[in-house]
């Protein structure tokens, strides 16, 4: 761009110089001996002012005529292409060879002007042009940013409403939105409503089923207890199996989550304290101590009753098998900062490594002498999965079992 502007201005200057060349050709005279004379001054007074930057010269084999602006200097050629003026400044110049009837030889005429003003003009022009372009770029960029922010403002508003929905401050999106995204908002509201209705209906059905089956099972158990031992041995296993199936499927129904699943939050430290107080009374004769090292400021994205169900099952197992100490602590995952590992360790006999994978399966019990149904760990595993978490078993540094419950942190 600068070179093209410079070439354009250089050509324009040469066209101006050609006008002066025509003036010189009209006013110049040469006698038969080659002497030169200018019959009238040029129209531009700069040719008569010394060192003005406007110069001309005409020469023959025998004579040289110069403009007054050259004073006592001559036009000199440098590097075969550059012509220097009276102050050794580079010139933009044109040359022409003239012939007159009174003189048979050629007359070489050179006229030039200082190129520095043109260079300075191009530099100033380009600096101003870049400044204008920079302002134009900043203005267009600012306009684009404003337009994008304005265009995305409905999505930002929707994001804020979804955050409020996740935190339980709202049950649906109720702001006004442009017609372009209004169908999306309507579908989201319908989806949330349908999801909440399904959860509520599932929990009602689970509660109704529980109440409907408890009474007949109690009657059957009481009736069986009045029979002889042979009949009891024959009928009690099917009744216990029915009870286990009911407990298992009711536990799965509870895993459907809370009504406001997007905004659930529970404090593991508080729940562990509450659960340990209850089990301390149940297992007071064994003298087991539970050490709660969980940070009281941490909350997980789990509904309170579901967290009680999971931690209650895990801590109860620890109380059953621990010798004296249960340690509950946590650790943030390095590769997933939004996930926390809640670890429950005991100093009991633990579980053989080859059986760690099978003990989580439904109905599996390693010790039939201990009370229970073998459903606890399986229910905890599936409940954790429903909250995008997982249950892992390992060997504790205390010598017993280490249970790792990985859960998402609450927003």
Image (cartoon, rainbow, N blue to C red):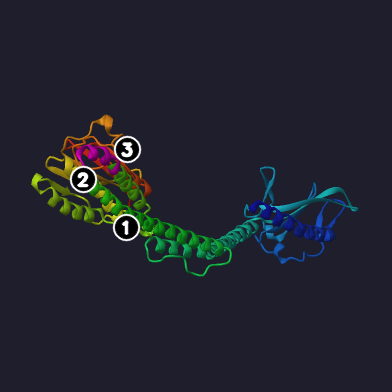
* Residue 136 relative to residue 57: left or right: left
Residue located beneath label 1 in the image? 265
Q: Quadrant of the C terminus?
A: bottom left
Pick the residue in front: 407 or 383: 383
Circles 2 and 3 in contact, beta carbons < 8 Å: no
Pick the residue in front: 270 or 160: 270
Q: Residues within 10 Å of mark 2 (few under 14, many from 20)?
A: some
Alpha-carbon span between mark 2 and mark 1: 45 Å
Q: Which mark is on residue 225?
A: 2
Residue located beneath label 3 in the image? 361
Return the x and y of residue 265 as percentages of the image width and height: 32, 57
Q: Work out whether mark 3 precedes mark 1 in sequence or the reverse, and give the earlier one.
A: 1
Residue lying at the far top of the rendered structure: 354
Q: Dot 2 lies on which element?
A: helix
Residue 410 in view (yes/no): no
Verify whether residue 236 appears in magenta: yes
Residue at 41% x, 66% y is 170
Verify whether residue 41 appears in magenta: no
Q: In the rendered image, which quarter is residue 138 located in?
A: bottom right
Residue 198 in view (yes/no): yes
Return the x and y of residue 20 as percentages of the image width and height: 78, 60
Return the x and y of residue 143 as percentages of the image width and height: 56, 64
Pick the residue in front: 311 or 223: 223
Between circles 2 and 1, the one closer to the viewer is 2
Please state the extent of the stretch shown in magenta in the rendering.
Answer: 225-239
Where 371 sits versus 92, above or below?
above
Residue at 73% x, 59% y is 67
Residue at 10% x, 44% y is 286
Q: Residues within 10 Å of mark 3 (few under 14, many from 20)?
A: some
Q: In the rendered image, which quarter is residue 111 located in?
A: bottom right
Where 397 sits versus 292, above or below?
above
């Amino acid at each position: 761009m600068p070179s093209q502007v410079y070439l354009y201005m250089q050509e324009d200057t040469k066209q101006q110089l050609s006008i002066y060349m025509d003036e010189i050709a009209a006013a110049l005279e040469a006698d038969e001996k080659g002497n030169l004379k200018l019959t009238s001054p040029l129209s531009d007074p700069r040719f008569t002012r010394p060192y003005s930057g406007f110069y001309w010269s005409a020469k023959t084999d025998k004579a040289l005529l110069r403009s007054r602006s050259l004073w006592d200097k001559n036009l000199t050629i440098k590097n075969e292409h550059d012509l220097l003026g009276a102050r050794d400044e580079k010139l933009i110049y044109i040359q022409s060879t003239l012939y007159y009837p009174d003189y048979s030889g050629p007359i070489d005429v050179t006229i030039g002007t200082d190129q520095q003003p043109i260079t300075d003009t191009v530099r100033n022009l380009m600096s101003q042009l870049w400044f204008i372009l920079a302002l134009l770029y900043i203005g267009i960029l600012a306009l684009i940013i404003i337009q994008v922010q304005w265009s995305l403002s409905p999505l930002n508003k929707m994001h804020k409403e979804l955050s409020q929905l996740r935190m339980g401050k709202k049950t649906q999106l109720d702001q006004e939105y442009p017609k372009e995204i209004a169908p999306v908002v309507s579908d989201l509201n319908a989806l949330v409503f349908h999801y909440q209705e399904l959860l509520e209906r599932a929990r009602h059905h689970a509660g109704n089923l529980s109440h409907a089956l408890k009474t007949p099972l109690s009657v059957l158990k009481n009736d069986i207890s009045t029979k002889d031992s042979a009949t009891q041995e024959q009928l009690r296993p099917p009744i216990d199996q029915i009870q286990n199936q009911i407990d298992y499927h009711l536990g799965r129904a509870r895993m459907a989550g809370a009504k406001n699943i997007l905004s659930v939050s529970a404090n593991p430290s508080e729940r562990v304290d509450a659960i340990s107080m209850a089990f301390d009374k149940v297992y007071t004769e064994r003298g087991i101590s539970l050490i709660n090292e969980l940070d009281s400021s941490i909350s997980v994205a789990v509904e309170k009753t579901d967290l009680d169900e999971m931690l209650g099952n895990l801590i109860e197992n620890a109380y059953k098998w621990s010798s004296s100490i249960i340690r509950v602590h946590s650790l943030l995952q390095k590769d997933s900062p939004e996930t926390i590992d809640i670890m429950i360790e005991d100093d009991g006999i633990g579980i053989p490594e080859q059986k760690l994978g099978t003990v989580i399966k439904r109905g599996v019990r390693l010790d039939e002498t201990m009370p229970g149904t073998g459903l606890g760990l399986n229910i905890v595993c599936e409940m954790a999965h429903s909250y995008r978490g997982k249950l892992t078993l390992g060997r504790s540094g205390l010598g017993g079992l280490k249970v790792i419950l990985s859960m998402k942190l609450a927003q």
